[in-house]
């Protein structure tokens, strides 16, 4: 058995994988594969409707004036879409990692970008929390969880302008006031489903601020008016995301999942702090509950530790090339037993 700590694409619930693979052969006894159905069919319309409904329900935004979209192009396309739609003059970005930096780069195609805060000078090991003068911004963009550095906003900051968030690596992982956001988006491949689709949730009143004439594929209003089917959407990715959303609800929603995620995170962080062989990367107050980044105190022992965890069936523990060391990505679908196994392995490594 494998224990999948991959950062993304990442672990999905086993039940989701079973249902998805069955649907590849035969979708709900229709005699057709989910890969073969028309995106205009009633079967797919129902899949889209269910996915939209469940995404809003999980976020606690049902009936609160929000809409959900499922779009191609991953989170990276949203870096550009957000700015194309909403950056009329000046937008603020909090620079908390290389994904934020990439979002900033794309936004600059459309207008002025103010970096309201940055932790780049500290190798992004913490989250700046206070921003000045946000009232004149078209919006402020944050990255709620920094996948590479293992930092996360523990609370959503208060701002005096619309708030936009890239939530690719911590979407639906904890209880949060999702109504603080005017728009949030996430590439599916960390906590929602397979690569190839991004979920975008938009407050409808925010759309009144769109002024620019846009090419069709960048136009949120157009995509909304066509119910995420302006062109052929990624049918299979959306179907599998629907199954994951269903799984989240069946598991008791964000309250239950958040508890499980906190439990997993504190197990590993306590071991990182206790174990004389390891050192954590992120500032303690800003530690991520999704990506635990740590390193060896003595890097010459890397080969030994690598061999130990690999022999246990642990996968995907290597840190991002820009940080090095290790990164345990412990997304929603990773089970507590996998985390316990890793912690045991760290203990054994110390005691050997
Ligand atoms: C993975 C990731 C992205 C990139 O997503 P793509 O779907 O590959 O474009 C963007 N932001 C964050 C925070 C991520 O973790």
Image (cartoon, helix red, strand yellow):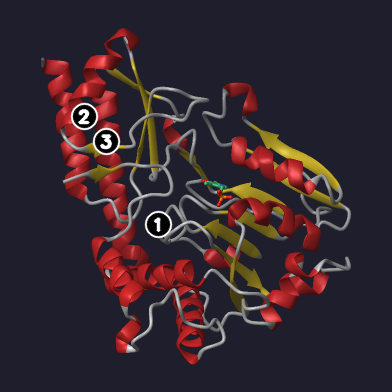
Q: Is residue 268 above or below residue 4?
A: above
Residue drawn at x 59%, y 54% is: 75
Circle nearer the viewer, 1 or 2: 2
Is residue 131 at all visible to an observer of this figure? no
How crowded is the residue under tag 2: few (<14 C-alpha within 10 Å), some, or many (20+)? some
Is the residue under label 3 in contact with that under label 1 (CB below 8 Å)? no
Circle nearer the viewer, 2 or 3: 2
Q: How many angstroms separate mark 2 from mark 3 (CA)?
A: 14 Å
Residue drawn at x 74%, y 75% is: 221
Quick check: is the Cβ at mark 1 less than 8 Å away from ligand 1? Answer: no
> Mark 2 sits on what residue?
309
Residue drawn at x 72%, y 58% is: 82
Q: Earlier in the sequence, mark 1 or mark 3?
A: 1
> Mark 3 sits on what residue?
268
Residue drawn at x 45%, y 29% is: 282
Numbered disc total: 3
Is the residue under label 2 in contact with that under label 1 (CB below 8 Å)? no
How crowded is the residue under tag 1: few (<14 C-alpha within 10 Å), some, or many (20+)? many
Q: Is residue 350 above or below residue 47?
A: above
Residue 348, quarter of picture: top left
Give the quarter of the figure containing the C terminus.
top left
**x, y percentage for residue 258?**
34, 57
Q: For the residue labelled by badge 2, is the local secondary structure a helix, a strand or a loop?
A: helix
Q: For the residue labelled by badge 1, is the local secondary structure a helix, a strand or a loop?
A: loop
**x, y percentage for residue 295?**
36, 21
- Left or right of 352: which side holds 158? right
**x, y percentage for residue 283?**
46, 29
Q: How many angstroms separate mark 1 from mark 3 (CA)?
A: 17 Å
Q: Earlier in the sequence, mark 2 or mark 3?
A: 3
Q: Is residue 295 above or below residue 40?
A: above
Farthest residue in the bottom direction? 42
> Mark 1 sits on what residue?
173
């Amino acid at each position: 058995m494998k224990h999948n700590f991959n950062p993304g694409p990442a672990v999905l619930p086993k039940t989701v994988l079973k249902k998805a693979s069955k649907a590849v052969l035969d979708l709900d006894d229709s005699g057709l594969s989910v890969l073969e159905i028309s995106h205009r069919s009633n079967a797919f319309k129902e899949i889209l409707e269910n996915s939209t409904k469940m995404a809003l329900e999980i976020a606690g935004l049902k009936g609160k004036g929000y809409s959900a979209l499922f779009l191609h192009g991953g989170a990276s396309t949203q870096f550009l879409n957000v700015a194309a739609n909403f950056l009329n003059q000046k937008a603020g970005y909090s620079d908390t990692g290389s994904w934020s930096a990439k979002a900033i780069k794309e936004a600059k195609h459309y207008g002025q970008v103010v970096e309201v805060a940055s932790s780049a000078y500290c190798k992004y090991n913490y989250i700046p929390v206070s921003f000045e003068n946000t009232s004149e911004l078209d919006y402020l963009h944050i990255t709620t969880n920094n996948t590479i550095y293992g930092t996360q906003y523990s609370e959503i900051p208060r701002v005096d302008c619309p708030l936009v968030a890239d939530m690719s690596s911590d979407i639906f992982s904890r209880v949060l006031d999702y109504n603080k956001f005017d728009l949030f988006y996430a590439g599916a491949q960390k906590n929602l489903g397979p690569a190839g689709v991004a979920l975008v949730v938009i407050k409808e009143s925010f759309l009144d601020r769109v002024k620019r004439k846009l090419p069709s594929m960048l136009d949120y209003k157009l995509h909304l008016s066509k119910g995420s089917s302006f062109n052929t959407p990624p049918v299979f990715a959306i179907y599998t995301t629907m199954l994951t959303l269903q799984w989240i609800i069946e598991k008791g929603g964000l309250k239950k999942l958040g508890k499980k995620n906190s439990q997993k995170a504190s197990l590993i962080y306590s071991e990182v702090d206790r174990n004389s062989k390891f050192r954590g990367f992120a500032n303690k107050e800003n530690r991520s509950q999704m990506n635990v980044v740590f390193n060896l105190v003595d890097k010459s022992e890397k080969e030994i530790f690598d061999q130990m965890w690999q022999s246990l069936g642990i996968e995907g523990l290597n840190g991002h090339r820009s940080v090095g060391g290790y990164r345990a990505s412990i997304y929603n679908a990773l089970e507590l037993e996998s985390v316990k196994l890793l912690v045991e392995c760290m203990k054994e490594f110390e005691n050997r």
